[in-house]
Image: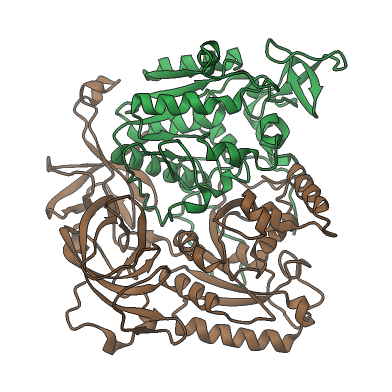
């Protein structure tokens, strides 16, 4: 860690970096770590030694994050690297994602758990296809905030005119793709301008530095504002194995609250069976709770002896989703082999995995026009709309409503590989025009 | 930016905190703090979720338990995940034969206390019967891979919990929470599965297994704060004590049967503690007067050297030492 002491009660903010190759992402992350005093002496020694061995005049901060041999050899980032740093105000988990098109799936990976995406562009090159793709990914995955860092501003002479031109274009593109909250900052990762400290070379920029902004941003909307959702992970029944005989007849349902708040006495429904009951107790190893909220891991006891198993969803009785076997969703296709109608896959949703068949490929997203184009199939890195039929019902909701109960994976039944990141319903609402909506809208 | 040197780590409660709202912000109204988990509670909840997922989706999980602080915390989380039922899997230790005796004693006492089954895969056995040979440099950490893989295959373990943390080392920063290994235990960093949201995909083909890392997102400081909050007991050598040591490669090594000083390496008695506990031959101690957990937290928060950089000779062998070992089946 670093020399900062963070109170143990600090909150975490999760961020992911994105951008095209050579935009300087690893350098920016290295700079963020270095200038926030999060790099320790031995790490810096190693990086300085390697930089010297390669005949570089200055220390290559990208070496702090590019940890794989191939990455250092080629000077690129291949896979997501997770870094941890803290300031006096906040702790951060940073997913440093690669920029190469073939590694887009890693950007999807990083963005899926992020509160903030920091997207880099090169001030000389402006917006590229990858920039639009990453903005679309951030919008699609409902990342709460996107910060576009206009990097290498030093190489355009710290020009306000160039920055404003790019900022306008980014804002317009982001709006077209439905990005919820987008901000821009002029930076130079190499020079350290506006990363941690505000730079004297951009007097025309009066906003916060990148780190100041990251310290201030509210984390993603707390799912405790949503209706109570609890995917059952496992049933806890110690029976004869209980080390304390008082728990021989214990029966509880363990899981992590996906959304909302639960209190003892709440009326709940178990899906997909539809059986109703009440919450008799909320247990943890540290004692009983009267209420719990997302994302706490707890064990629930119900008042009735009903059949509940892994994969079931316990939800508030007043406002529960309707289980369905027909799911329409937006998918980011992450596999080499294409997705075609008729493909048989596995679908993983919360704690359940079911067989699924692809009924139809509705279309794919054109990133230049932000519209859905007709398509027969989805290829690697495509983002598109599909209609799926499931072998058994799942209690899914629109991803726009709930990031937890609206997300799913498509998995290759043969080798177990992850094929797609899926979002139920109109995840990219902004990009879909009303006439694109099929008449039979299932969810 | 202001760096606060250290401040008192205040008493934390088990519940949510009301003191996490940011100071007056120019960007947004203060966040509602009444239903927001503190960092430690968030990490604990995430780890418990991962442990439960793996147990639910795999046939034969096992937890690697050495008695070191990270595996102790991981086991503590496993106990919490299944309470009031017992931990539903055995634990395994790959014993290099060069472990600190007090750590082995602690390992056995912990296993007994929790009523767990302990499997030991012994590097010494492999050396004795010729399946492995001693390295020229005397370090045995790289020799752990073969006994580990044999034990995984022999017991048909399909999920192996490890206490690796991403902040420990560059190659570990690239690890997924669930990391697929082929029948040779190999890790292919260029071909890792995307890992999305908190949906962990553990499907694998026969012969493959998965390494699961429930404390991936914890830092060294998180671990120590949690140890303090939960009153977790650790082997005594994590705290300052007097020990006969000698200096080699900038590290303080303990004088013992597996690490003898050369003539030009004078032996001195120093007050030291261990930041990591591994092989006696390649794990260095640090000078320290931190005799309790609060003092250790203060020390860790102020240190300028990483945990492994300060203490592990085996990671210094080459710039990509850890990556190379992981590719052939190391943790």
What color does chain A have in the rendering? Answer: brown
At 70% from the left and 50% from the top, the residue drawn is A38
Measuring from the top left, give residue B40's x and y in whole percent.
51, 44
Q: How many marks?
A: 0
In the picture, residue A304 is in which quadrant?
Answer: top left
The C terminus of chain A sits in image quarter? bottom left
- As drawn, A377 above or below A89: below
Is any part of residue A320 visible from this angle?
no
The N terminus of chain A sits in image quarter? top right
In terms of depth relative to the viewer, which is nearer, A152 or A380? A380
Is any part of residue B155 visible from this angle?
yes
Measuring from the top left, give residue A66's x and y in whole percent.
64, 54
At 37% from the left and 44% from the top, the residue drawn is A297
As drawn, the residue found furthest toward the front would be: B130
Instruction: Tell me which colouring the rendered structure shows.
Output: by chain
Measuring from the top left, give residue A408's x and y in whole percent.
32, 60
What color does chain B have in the rendering? Answer: green
In the picture, residue B318 is in which quadrant?
Answer: top right
In the picture, residue B5 is in which quadrant?
Answer: top right
Measuring from the top left, give residue A191's x and y in whole percent.
79, 68
In terms of depth relative to the viewer, which is nearer, A368 or B305? A368
- As drawn, A192 above or below B255: below
At 40% from the left and 28% from the top, the residue drawn is B152
At 29% from the left and 28% from the top, the residue drawn is B85
- As drawn, B222 above or below A319: above
- As drawn, A155 above or below A16: below
In terms of depth relative to the viewer, which is nearer, B277 or B159? B159
């Amino acid at each position: 860690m670093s020399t900062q002491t963070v109170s143990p009660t600090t909150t975490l903010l999760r961020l992911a970096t994105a951008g095209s190759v050579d935009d300087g992402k690893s350098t920016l992350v290295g700079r963020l770590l270095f200038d926030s005093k999060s790099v320790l002496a031995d790490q810096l020694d190693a990086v300085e030694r390697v930089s010297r061995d390669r005949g570089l005049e200055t220390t290559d901060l990208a070496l702090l994050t590019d940890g794989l041999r191939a990455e250092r050899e080629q000077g690129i980032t291949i896979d997501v690297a997770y870094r941890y740093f803290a300031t006096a105000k906040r702790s951060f988990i940073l997913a440093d994602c690669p920029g190469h098109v073939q590694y887009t799936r890693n950007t999807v990976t990083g963005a899926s758990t992020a509160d903030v995406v920091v997207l880099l562009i090169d001030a000389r090159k402006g917006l590229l296809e990858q920039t639009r793709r990453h903005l679309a990914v951030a919008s699609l995955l409902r990342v709460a905030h996107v910060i576009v860092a206009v990097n290498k501003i030093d190489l355009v002479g710290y020009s306000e005119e160039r920055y404003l031109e790019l900022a306008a274009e980014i804002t317009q593109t982001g709006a077209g793709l439905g990005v919820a909250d987008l901000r821009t900052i002029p930076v130079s990762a190499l020079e350290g301008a506006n990363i941690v400290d505000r730079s004297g070379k951009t007097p025309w920029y009066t906003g916060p530095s990148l780190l100041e902004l990251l310290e201030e941003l509210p984390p993603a909307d707390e799912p405790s504002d949503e209706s109570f959702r609890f995917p059952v992970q496992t049933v806890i029944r110690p029976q004869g194995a209980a080390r304390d005989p008082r728990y021989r007849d214990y029966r509880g349902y363990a899981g992590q609250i996906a959304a909302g708040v639960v209190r003892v006495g709440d009326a709940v429904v178990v899906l997909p069976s539809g059986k109703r009951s009440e919450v008799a107790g909320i247990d943890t190893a540290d004692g009983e709770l009267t209420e719990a909220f997302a994302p706490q891991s707890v064990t629930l006891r119900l008042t009735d002896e009903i059949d509940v198993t892994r994969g079931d969803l316990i939800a508030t009785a007043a406002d529960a989703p309707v289980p369905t076997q027909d799911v329409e969703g937006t998918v980011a296709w992450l596999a080499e082999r294409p997705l075609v109608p008729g493909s048989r896959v596995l679908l993983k949703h919360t704690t359940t995995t079911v067989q699924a068949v692809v009924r139809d490929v509705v279309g794919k997203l054109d990133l230049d026009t932000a519209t859905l184009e007709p398509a027969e199939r989805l290829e690697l890195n495509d983002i598109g709309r599909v209609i799926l039929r499931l072998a058994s019902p799942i209690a899914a909701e629109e991803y726009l409503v709930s990031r937890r109960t609206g997300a799913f994976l498509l998995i290759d039944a043969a080798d177990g590989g992850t094929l797609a990141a899926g979002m139920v319903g109109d995840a990219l609402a902004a990009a879909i025009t009303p006439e694109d909506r099929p008449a039979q809208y299932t969810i | 930016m202001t760096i606060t040197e250290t401040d008192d780590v205040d008493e934390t409660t088990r519940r949510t905190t009301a003191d996490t709202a940011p100071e007056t912000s120019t960007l947004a109204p203060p966040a509602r703090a009444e239903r927001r988990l503190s960092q430690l509670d968030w990490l604990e909840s995430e780890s418990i979720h991962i442990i439960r997922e793996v147990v639910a989706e795999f046939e034969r999980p096992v937890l690697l338990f050495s008695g070191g602080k990270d595996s102790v915390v991981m086991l503590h989380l496993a106990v919490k995940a299944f309470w009031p039922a017992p931990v539903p899997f055995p634990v395994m230790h790959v014993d290099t034969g060069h472990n600190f005796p007090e750590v082995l004693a602690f390992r056995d006492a912990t296993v007994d206390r929790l009523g767990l089954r302990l499997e030991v895969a012994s590097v010494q056995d492999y050396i004795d019967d010729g399946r492995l040979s001693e390295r020229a440099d005397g370090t045995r950490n790289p020799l752990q891979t073969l006994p580990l893989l044999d034990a995984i295959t022999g017991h048909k373990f399909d999920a192996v919990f490890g206490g690796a943390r991403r902040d420990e080392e560059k190659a570990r920063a690239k690890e997924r929470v669930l990391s697929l290994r082929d029948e040779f235990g190999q890790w292919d960093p260029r071909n890792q599965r995307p890992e999305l949201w908190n949906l962990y995909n553990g499907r694998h083909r026969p012969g493959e297994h998965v390494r699961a890392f429930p404390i991936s997102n914890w830092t060294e400081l998180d671990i120590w704060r949690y140890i303090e909050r939960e009153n977790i007991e650790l082997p005594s050598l994590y705290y300052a004590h007097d020990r006969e040591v000698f200096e080699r490669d900038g590290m303080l090594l303990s004088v013992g049967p597996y690490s003898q000083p050369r003539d030009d390496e004078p032996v001195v008695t120093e007050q030291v503690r261990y930041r990591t506990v591994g092989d006696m031959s390649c794990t260095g101690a640090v000078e320290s007067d931190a005799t309790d957990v609060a003092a250790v937290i203060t020390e860790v928060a102020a240190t300028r050297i990483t945990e492994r950089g300060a203490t592990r000779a085996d990671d210094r062998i080459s710039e990509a030492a850890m990556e190379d070992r992981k590719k052939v089946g190391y943790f």
